[in-house]
Amino acid sequence: MSDSPILFVRTVAKRFGGTVVLEDMNLTVERGSIHAVVGESGAGKSTLIKVLAGIVRPDRGTIEYDGKKVTIGSPDAARKQGIGVVLQQAGLFPERPVLANLFVNGEPLHNGLISRREMEARSRDVLRQLGLAVDVHRPLSDLAPGERQLIAIARALLENPRLLILDDPNSALDRRQSERLFAVLRGLKARGMSMLYASNRLEETLAIADQLTVIRNGRDVLSKARQDLTASEEAMIGQLRQSLFPLPPRALPTLAGTLRPQITVAGLGGGRLDGICFTARAGEIVGLAGLAGSGASNLLAMLFGQQKAREGKVRFPDGDGLPRTRTEAARRNICLISGERGNGLMPDKSIAFNLSNVVVGARDWGTRWYSPRMALGRAARQIEALRIRSAPEMPAGSLSAGGQQKVIIAKWLEIGPQVVLLDEPARGIDIGSKQEIYALIRQMAASGCIVLLHSKELSELTGLCDRILAFRQGRLVGEIADAAMDAGTILKLIAADEPGSEHRQSRRESAA
Amino acid sequence: MENHSLLQRLIARPEFGPFVLLVVEVAVFWGFNHDFLSPQNISNILAFTVELGLIALAMTLLMTSGEFDLSVGSLFGFSPVLMWTLFNSGITSLEVGFLVALLVAALIGLVNGWFVTQLKIPSFLVTLGMLLVVRGTALFVTDGFPQRTWSAEGSWLANILVGDFFIGPFRIYMSLFWFIAAAIALGYVLTQSRTGNWIQAAGGNPNAARARGVNVSGVKIGLFVLSSLMASFAGIISSLRTSAANPNSGTGYELEVIAMVVIGGTALTGGRGTIIGTVLGILILRVMRNGIVLIGVPGLAYNIFIGAIILGMMALHSWLERRHQAGT
């Protein structure tokens, strides 16, 4: 094996229409190392990776792979070169069995027919390494999002690539799966595989990367070995490291609770949930901690009228009773913002249209009809307020993941919500957008909203919430506030000892 | 949930619903009129079943890839007209006419596929246009009159395609074997071959398939050609069997074929298809048509039952789907 780098990217540029996505991108990946690419969303990471995967053709620039100048004209060409790619949108086939997903367009043949036995044999090792214990004959849609992500990674690994490219691979993974993945990646590195790793989660990136390239606005602005990184450079890497939770915890106004609008939940049950009682008042952010299957997200869905409750009473600021439909919820100033990607977004429609669809559909909007001019005006305001980097006429799907999530938040802000239900609102988006979204959540609470926040990232809960309700297996098992709010305490409360239950629940969620 | 019994797994299969329906249907018709299962009637059902069935088999693959083809009914009428016109005017022999008809059909499929994949026009519009063009051509060429077909008797082509013989009391046409062969071959292609994997990938998530290097356009064009070829082949078989080449034959077949395919459990939106289900769907509709007449319901009422079956099956499929998603 020679010591020359396996991949050179030189002055690569790409524009889509009038938008310059990559301006002048340079990158060198050493053999047998993990090279991380970090940058805010919209900086060009995903486009760079699609160029290397043969999905996007660059306008300019050269790519040198394994000492030769190459043109990667198609995904097949990339594969022939030994480049394995896991894209951000994993590109799986939910209706097909897991096994078929692992071998799309790489099916082993036996006498001209696909050999299931060989597929099983070949995939067994890789799946075990990744810690995936799933029935490979089940449809992929039965798996939890994290497991699906790992299937996409397994699919790339099965081709024994020499260069493995991962675009934000652990956005859907929980901590344990993430650690497992990192162990596997380190193992592959030890066996000489080179990796290019794009991520939004800086901490984890620093933990695994040997080299680091920071990109901004389609240019590489810094490229260094991990250990040569100085403190000031780490600081420069971005406003990235800047504290995620900018505002200090606020002292709650000590008004009598009864005077302020509040939600009272008494004995709520349904689905996995049983006997949930709590109160949340205006101006506070109440965290809902819980693993997959704890029922915390079901509770939010119930309060939003998405799932039916079996029993119990709920009192909203505007009266008794759960909303029966989502439209009713929107009319009663209740909103649910979920981090599930693509949730409620119409990617082909303009940002302005997306921003106005709830308010037009569910609420009085000032005029009787949908007015594009009015929508544009209002959209322009939200775009500025939330710093969405685009114009109102652009399709919402052209935004980065963080930008799309901001559009979803903004569309609910349009109705002037009183109750804000958040289900992992910042999942899988970049640090910059995360920070802005956190600030927005704080603002919503400060302006008198009742905010319920469910997240699997405990730091998110401890950083944002005034108090935290812990859920385990459909029950409320504790409440923590103030000084007691640290990740360890929460984890002790929510950690379930029945592994089976988690699996079952996550499957149900993924199917919904 | 994890330890299914064999029976449970059988019930969970998408083909189970259509299978039960077929059994119930046969039982009901037999209950009303025992002649329903007489050898003569079974032979009757089979003879015509295979002709629509051939089209439905190809349509299953096409629909699994996320497209469908409305022009099959008009090709069913046009191809025999073309073949007989060539033959009757003395330009070619019957065999060459047959090949020319297939070739033209393939070309039509190619055009369909090209419009759909390259110009990105929905297959509904493309094949609707093609339906009118092809049917119109058939009518124009023949002035609307059926073609003479009396000279097919004894030609070797007619013998391979629709030669008939008796197995016991059953009168079997050769076309049944063509149908069985096609069902097995396409069943294997769909479930056991790389091509089948690509078809299902292209229908399930075309962008992901493209990102994996699957030639989605190529797959779809190929399937359009296949569907046209099968429709043409079926039309010629039908015309040889009935000794008639009517430019109007096959009208409305496209929808009946699509109904057969969806009743069998193939998704109209693509990504999921089953040949076994289609075979069941074909039998369900053909048995229905035959049985209704046999038990004395006016044949004109046939469509009422077909419509009811489609609605009922779709309701069942969606109910099963939702039950599955509820995680039971």
Image (spheres, coloured by chain):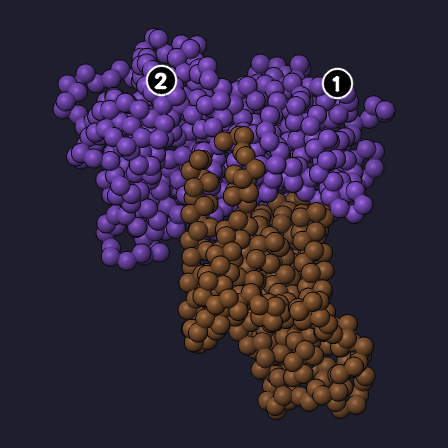
Three-letter amino acid code at the position of disc 1 = Ala
Q: Which chain is purple?
A: A
Chain to which mark 2 belongs:
A
Numbered disc 1: secondary structure: helix
Q: Is residue B201 left or right of residue A338?
A: right
* Neighbourhood count class around disc 2 (C-alpha, 10 Å): few under 14, some 14–19, many 20 upward: many
Three-letter amino acid code at the position of disc 2 = Ala
Residue visible at 53% across and 53% down in the picture: B19
Camera sees residue B256:
no
A495 is higher (above) or lower (below) than B220:
above
Residue visible at 73% across and 43% down in the picture: A114
Residue visible at 83% across and 33% down in the picture: A67
Instruction: Residue A190: give its label.
Output: 1
Residue A40: percent from left, percent from top: 53, 31
Chain to which mark 1 belongs:
A
Camera sees residue A509:
yes
Residue B83, located in which quarter of the rendered image?
bottom right
Badge nearest the viewer, 2 or 1: 2
Numbered disc 2: secondary structure: strand
Tell me the residue that label 2 is attached to. A470
Total number of numbered discs in the rendering: 2
Q: Is residue A439 left or right of residue A503?
A: left
Residue B38, located in which quarter of the rendered image?
bottom right
Residue A322: percent from left, percent from top: 24, 35
Q: Which chain is brown?
A: B
